[in-house]
Image: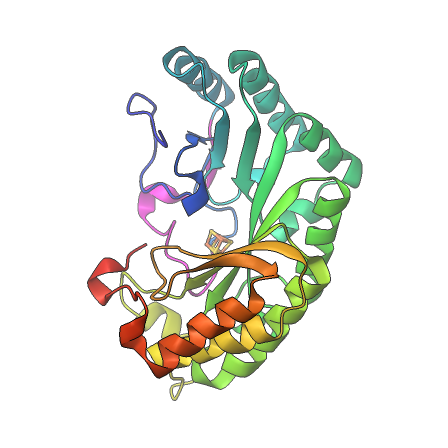
């Protein structure tokens, strides 16, 4: 279902791959941070951050409920709907619950700083109102790289947010960006990202490949002039190092976003060796694995 043509979405609209069948409600426009070096999702002039006016949003929820009353999953867009106050989020979720009798899960992207701004009790209230899953773009566990890419977060702030969400019983899906630190940071990016997921044990883990649909210049400006991005082999070697160093029990791992060359799926840890074998095969004999071509990749 994803989007409803009669709702007033401000394009472009993004959602995680796993929300392909969810109804998307755009409760805010853009991202309140919008300063990450690699991210151009919300840089168009019409995407300047602002929350949607409550009366407009509420009438959209009612309209969507009339069209799709059987909806079971709703994704709150855009980049960090969790920046809204708990009071406002609860009002939205209360209306969703009353309009959609079959609703099973409400989800959203979420920045660690959104979580810091809420108490554990507030997060529990949101969970009880239906917030079942948040997608946290950790990007990396490496502090040096987090600073360079202007993420505005640290290893510690990301770990604290993920642990707080867990205490509130809100499931977490963590995203790590393969290739984010190019050649110079590849090893420390892989090792510290593994440390971050080991310490937080998210329910879901996804790796995306850094991509530049509008060119690399904006991103490269954050790094020294001799900075080099990874080629495909470098990306696979980084993934190998990352997976090798994970120590997880039952995290569902997906590397199936449109940006990835190599599609990987499994549960970490039980499928760790199988995933490593697939990566190693892609390195040694790429013709024997299904790789996305450049033209098949996208955002
Ligand atoms: S916080 Fe997320 S949406 Fe916002 S600029 Fe960074 S990567 Fe983009």
Magenta region, residue range: 35-52
Q: Which residue: 34% across, 23% down?
A: 7
- Is residue 178 within the magenta segment? no
Dividing the picture into quadrants, the one containing residue 216 is bottom left
- Is residue 50 within the magenta segment? yes
Q: Is residue 273 above or below residue 169?
A: below
- Residue at the farthest left position: 295
Instruction: Decide which of 49, 7 is in the foreground and name it.
Output: 7
The x, y position of residue 53, in whole percent, is: 48, 24
The x, y position of residue 47, in whole percent, is: 37, 43
Dividing the picture into quadrants, the one containing residue 208 is bottom left
Q: Which residue: 67% across, 62% down?
A: 248
Instruction: Decide which of 100, 119 is in the foreground and name it.
Output: 100
For the question of whether residue 220 can be seen, the reply is yes
For the question of whether residue 179 can be seen, the reply is no
Say which quadrant the C terminus sits in. Answer: bottom left
Q: Is residue 38 above or below residue 244?
A: above
Q: Is residue 3 above or below residue 135?
A: above
């Amino acid at each position: 279902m994803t989007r409803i043509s009669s709702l007033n979405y401000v394009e472009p609209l993004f959602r995680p791959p796993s929300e392909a069948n969810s109804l998307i409600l755009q409760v805010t426009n853009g991202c309140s941070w919008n300063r990450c070096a690699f991210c151009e999702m919300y840089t168009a002039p019409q995407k300047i951050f602002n929350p949607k006016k409550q009366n407009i949003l509420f009438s959209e929820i009612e309209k969507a409920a009339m069209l799709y009353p059987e909806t079971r999953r709703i994704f709150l867009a855009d980049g960090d709907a969790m920046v809204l106050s708990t009071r406002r989020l609860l009002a939205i979720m209360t209306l969703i619950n009353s309009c959609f009798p079959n609703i099973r899960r409400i989800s959203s992207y979420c920045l660690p700083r959104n979580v810091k701004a809420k108490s554990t009790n507030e997060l529990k209230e949101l969970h009880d109102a239906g917030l079942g899953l948040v997608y946290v773009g950790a990007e990396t566990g490496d502090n040096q790289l987090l600073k360079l890419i202007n993420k505005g977060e640290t290893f510690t702030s990301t770990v604290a947010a993920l642990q707080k969400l867990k205490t509130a019983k809100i499931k977490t899906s963590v995203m790590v960006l393969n290739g984010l630190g190019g050649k110079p940071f590849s090893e420390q990016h892989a090792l510290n990202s593994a440390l971050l997921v080991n310490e937080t044990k998210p329910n879901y883990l996804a790796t995306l490949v850094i991509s530049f649909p509008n060119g690399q210049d904006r991103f490269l400006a954050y790094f020294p002039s001799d900075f080099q991005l990874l080629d495909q082999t470098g990306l696979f070697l980084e993934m190998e190092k990352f997976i090798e160093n994970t120590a997880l029990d039952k995290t569902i791992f997906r590397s199936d976003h449109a940006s990835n060359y190599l599609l990987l799926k499994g549960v970490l840890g039980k499928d760790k060796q199988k995933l490593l074998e697939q990566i190693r095969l892609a390195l040694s004999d790429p013709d024997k694995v299904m790789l996305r071509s450049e033209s098949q990749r996208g955002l």
